């Protein structure tokens, strides 16, 4: 790899920008491809560009053969993100576990007494109202959103923004009764049944979790399951 190519990849990683390095395994030629690339491989072969974009989407590096030539597509994606609405007890272990799992975690809560560095060391805190914070962070298909406050005034605005986004996972804490009320409110706000059904509620896998740490385990496990199920579905399409 040329020094300038490595430097560009490192710069893109620092800027949390997705990029794929396409290497012609016979000639050794290398090209960087971005989701919005307007030049590069497509000038010679549009299929290479398409494959590189799909590789970034699926977060998978692999070898592809096109026209008898082999190309290695190496993906350098920014970290997955997790946006947690509510700096509550469950958010403390969940934010730490998600960070260890490789997520770039942000906890959104306008309540300054909850969202403190002492309670969330090393975690990014956003003190905006959830809908404003979510719009600022702009959830995409590499983002998981979890609401944990049990307070419709905080959870619902965050969910409304999440449901309009491409977030791969949306989960909300609360009992089935609580969620039924949530569904009524979101439906009244104009969301369709299909849109509301994107919410995993009660959040997390049913593993009998009781403590905040156990609930956090169940949530991260479900997020992981949904992430890989969607990647597998795209790969099979």
Image (cartoon, rainbow, N blue to C red):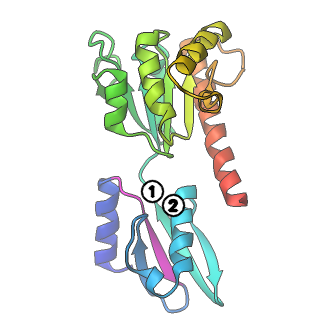
- Which residue: 61% across, 74% down? 63
Q: Is residue 79 visible?
A: yes
The residue that disc 1 covers is 77
Q: Is residue 234 above or below residue 181?
A: below
Q: Residues at badges 1 and 2 in contact (C-beta under 8 Å)? A: yes
| Residue 25 found in image quarter | bottom right
Q: Is residue 143 left or right of residue 220?
A: left
Q: Residues within 10 Å of mark 1 (few under 14, many from 20)?
A: many
Q: Is residue 236 above or below residue 39?
A: above
Provide residue 14's location: percent of width, then percent of height: 30, 54
Provide residue 232's location: percent of width, then percent of height: 69, 52
Residue 135 included in the magenta stretch of the image: no
Q: Earlier in the sequence, mark 1 or mark 2?
A: 2
Q: Residues within 10 Å of mark 2 (few under 14, many from 20)?
A: many
Secondary structure beneath dot 2 equals helix
Provide residue 80's location: percent of width, then percent of height: 47, 44
Q: Nearer the viewer, residue 66 or 184?
A: 184
- Quarter of the figure with the C terminus: bottom right
The residue that disc 2 covers is 56
């Amino acid at each position: 790899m040329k020094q300038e190519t490595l430097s560009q990849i490192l710069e893109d990683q620092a800027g949390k920008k997705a990029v794929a390095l396409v290497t012609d395994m016979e000639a050794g030629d290398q090209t960087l491809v971005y989701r919005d690339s307007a030049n590069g491989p497509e000038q010679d072969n549009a299929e290479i560009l398409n494959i590189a974009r799909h590789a970034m989407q699926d977060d998978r590096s692999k070898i592809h053969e096109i026209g008898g030539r082999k190309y290695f597509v190496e993906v350098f994606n920014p970290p997955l993100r997790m946006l947690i609405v509510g700096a509550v007890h469950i958010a403390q272990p969940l934010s730490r576990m998600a960070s260890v799992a490789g997520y770039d975690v942000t906890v959104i809560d306008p309540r300054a007494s909850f969202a403190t560095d002492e309670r969330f060391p090393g975690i990014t805190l956003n003190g905006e109202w959830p809908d404003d914070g979510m719009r600022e962070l702009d959830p995409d298909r590499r983002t998981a959103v979890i609401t944990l406050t049990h307070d419709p005034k905080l959870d619902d605005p965050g969910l409304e923004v999440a449901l309009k986004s491409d977030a791969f996972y949306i989960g909300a804490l609360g009992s089935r009764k609580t969620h039924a009320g949530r569904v009524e409110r979101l439906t009244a706000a104009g969301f369709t049944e299909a849109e509301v059904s994107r919410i995993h509620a009660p959040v997390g896998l049913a593993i009998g979790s009781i403590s905040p740490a156990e609930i956090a385990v169940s949530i991260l496990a479900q997020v992981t399951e949904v992430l890989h199920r969607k990647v597998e579905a795209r790969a099979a399409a």
